[in-house]
Image (cartoon, grey):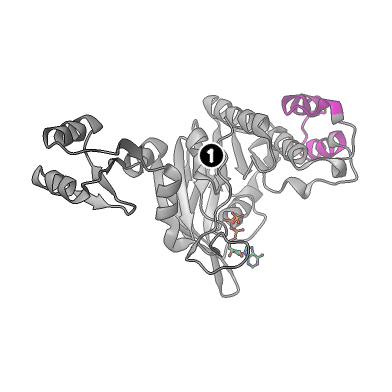
């Protein structure tokens, strides 16, 4: 269990983390979500005592990180995959870590095998691809066989097979009763992995909810209709008690209705329909709406030639990869 209480970090006048209080429980994968610059990495660094909080506390199974003897046996973390010593082999990088925490050398081979790096174990890590570096970082997190694991953007640089592997690994580790805390700025990725969600924006807690509740509350479903007689269709829908939203391009959206019901209503009123479809807003959209006021870096449209357009949140690519 990880517990944060009033955790706050200022860098000069900048508040990176703002009175964060939440718990990360064992036995589930907890996703840590927020747009770029929300404060996820700063929070994780403070959890590992790599940065000092301005105020507030973090406890790992009731203790401060610095009071853990041989911390790799309690908590393993993938924060910065490039943090390894590039001049050392993968094997020696892990061996040094193992020795510093009195972990037997046999475990080095085990974790290299687990992450699929055995064939390159004796190669210098500076020649590793992003994905191989990510796997080596994951191996170091697993080295002490800890009950708590933290991964900062673990799928960065991984190919679809690697993404699938890390997703299943996190689920399996949670299934063994471990505490798994994983950050991402991609809702779509989290939807496939996490059981619970902590969402932050500009350092503040925006949501602490189960994934099931988040999906239930945020994936709005509605029916989209298009007709050459749009006005008459709208009047018929209104007259039958439906709330209708005009969404542009001549389409109408109706919440809380089925395609069957609306199709029959249109038929009974001899209305021609060019479209009658059931729609579901994506979780990515719901997440973007939740964090819209807390997005720090805005892209300005998609026109690479610089034509002006409305600012929108800058978001990474969506990776479904399953
Ligand atoms: N050492 C530092 N000095 C000054 N400002 C910092 C420092 N580290 C982080 N920040 C600022 O604190 C805020 C939070 O940054 P952080 O890296 O924790 O966000 P993040 O949610 O991990 O973002 P990303 O998804 O882009 O990695 C940002 O505005 C960042 O510019």
Q: Which residue is drawn at 50% across and 33% down?
A: 192
Local packing at callout 1 (Cα closer than 10 Å; few below 14, some 14-19, many 20+) is many
Image side of residue 263 versus residue 85, left or right? left
Q: Where is residue 231 in the image (x, y as percent from the top left)?
A: 18, 51
Image side of residue 308 versus residue 72, left or right? left
Placement of 309 over or under 143, stated as above or below? below
Q: Where is residue 82 in the image (x, y as percent from the top left)?
A: 77, 48
Image side of residue 156 versus residue 315, left or right? right
> Where ligand 1 lies, by quadrant?
bottom right
Instruction: Locate residue 319: give its quadrant.
Output: top right
Using the rendered image of the protein, determine whether residue 1 is visible from the camera's viewpoint: no
Say which element carries label 1: helix
Task: Please tell me whether the stretch drawn in magenta is mainly helix, strand or loop.
Answer: helix
Instruction: Locate residue 260: give its quadrant.
Output: top left
Instruction: Locate residue 147: give its quadrant.
Output: top right
Q: Name the residue under label 1.
A: 189
Q: Where is residue 114 in the image (x, y as percent from the top left)?
A: 72, 25
Q: Which residue lies furthest to the bottom in this view?
A: 13
Residue 26 forms part of the magenta stretch: no
Using the rendered image of the protein, determine whether residue 232 is visible from the camera's viewpoint: yes
Q: Quadrant of the C terminus?
A: top right
Placement of 283 over or under 7, stated as above or below? above
Q: How many marks?
A: 1
Q: Position of residue 127 (x, y in %)?
A: 87, 42
Q: Which residues fall within the magenta stretch? A: 91-119
Q: 133 or 204, which is in the foreground?
A: 133
Placement of 59 over or under 161, stated as above or below? below
Residue 94 forms part of the magenta stretch: yes
Q: 87 or 300, which is in the foreground?
A: 300
């Amino acid at each position: 269990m990880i517990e944060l209480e009033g955790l706050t970090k200022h860098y000069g006048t900048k508040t990176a983390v703002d009175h964060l209080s939440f718990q990360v429980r064992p036995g589930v994968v907890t996703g840590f979500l927020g747009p770029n610059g929300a404060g996820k990495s700063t929070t994780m660094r403070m959890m590992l005592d790599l940065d000092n909080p301005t105020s507030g506390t973090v406890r790992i199974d009731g203790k401060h990180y610095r009071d853990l003897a041989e911390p790799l046996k309690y908590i393993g973390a993938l924060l910065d995959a490039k943090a390894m010593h590039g001049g050392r082999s993968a094997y020696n990088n892990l061996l040094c870590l193992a020795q510093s925490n009195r972990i037997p050398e046999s475990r080095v081979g085990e974790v290299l095998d687990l992450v699929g790096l055995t064939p390159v174990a004796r190669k210098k890590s500076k020649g590793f691809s992003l994905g191989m570096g990510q796997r080596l970082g994951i191996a170091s997190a697993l080295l002490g066989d800890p009950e708590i694991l933290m991964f900062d953007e673990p799928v960065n640089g991984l190919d679809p097979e690697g993404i699938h592997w890390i997703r299943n690994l996190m689920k399996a580790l949670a299934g063994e009763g471990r505490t798994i805390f994983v950050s991402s700025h991609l809702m779509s990725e989290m939807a496939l992995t996490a059981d619970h969600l902590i969402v932050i924006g500009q350092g503040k807690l925006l949501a602490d909810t189960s994934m099931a509740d988040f999906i239930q509350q945020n994936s709005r479903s509605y029916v989209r209709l298009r007709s050459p007689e749009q006005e008459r269709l709208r009047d018929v829908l209104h007259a039958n008690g439906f709330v209708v939203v005009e969404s542009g391009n001549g389409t109408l959206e109706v919440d809380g209705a089925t395609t069957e019901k609306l199709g029959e209503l249109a038929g009974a009123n001899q209305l021609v329909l060019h479209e009658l479809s059931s729609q579901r807003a994506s979780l990515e959209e719901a997440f973007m709406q939740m964090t819209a006021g807390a997005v720090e870096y805005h892209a300005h449209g998609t026109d690479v030639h610089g034509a002006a357009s409305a600012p929108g949140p800058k978001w990474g690519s969506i990776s479904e990869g399953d």
